[in-house]
Image: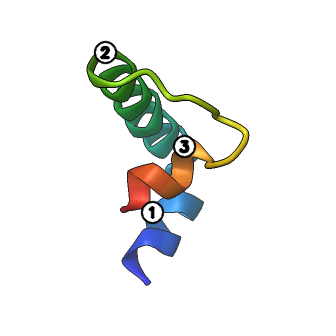
Amino acid sequence: MARMRRIRLRPSGIIRTVVSAQRKSNVNNPPPARSDRHPTVEARR
């Protein structure tokens, strides 16, 4: 429930966290296919 509220209040903040997660994942392990898994799903995990 808290996640839904955060998304509605500050979508930009979540986008920033997703971008940072993508950068970290790219540095550690380059993603073989982005179309298979959305970055938001990986960030929520």
Find the residue positioned furthest to the right: 35
Q: Image point 52% across, 73% down: which residue?
A: 4
Q: Position of residue 35 (x, y in %)?
A: 73, 39
Query: Marks 1 and 3, Cα distance to the nearest angstrom?
Result: 17 Å
Real-space Cα distance between discs 2 and 1?
27 Å
Q: Is residue 30 above or below residue 10?
A: above
Q: Position of residue 2 (x, y in %)?
A: 38, 77
Horizontal side, residue 8 vs residue 28: left or right: right
Q: Which label is found at residue 43?
A: none
Q: On the rendered image, what quadrant is the N terminus found in?
A: bottom left
Q: Nearer the viewer, residue 6 or 36?
A: 36
Q: Amino acid at mark 3?
A: Pro
Measuring from the top left, give residue 5's x and y in whole percent.
48, 71
Residue 10 or residue 15, whichever sits in front: 15
Residue 6, numbered circle: 1
Q: Secondary structure at mark 1?
A: helix
Q: Which residue has dot 2 on it?
A: 27
Q: Earlier in the sequence, mark 2 or mark 1?
A: 1
Q: Which residue is mark 3?
A: 39
Q: Are there few (<14), some (14-19), or many (20+) residues within 10 Å of tag 2?
A: few
Q: Name the amino acid type tagged 1.
A: Arg
- Residue at image x 68%, y 47%? 36
Helix, strand, or loop for circle 3? helix
Q: Residue furthest front?
A: 32
Q: Nearer the viewer, mark 1 or mark 3?
A: 3
Task: Tell me which residue sits at (43%, 21%) in the image.
Answer: 30
* Crowding at mark 3 (Cα within 10 Å: few <14, some 14-19, many 20+): some
Residue 43: % across, % down? 41, 50
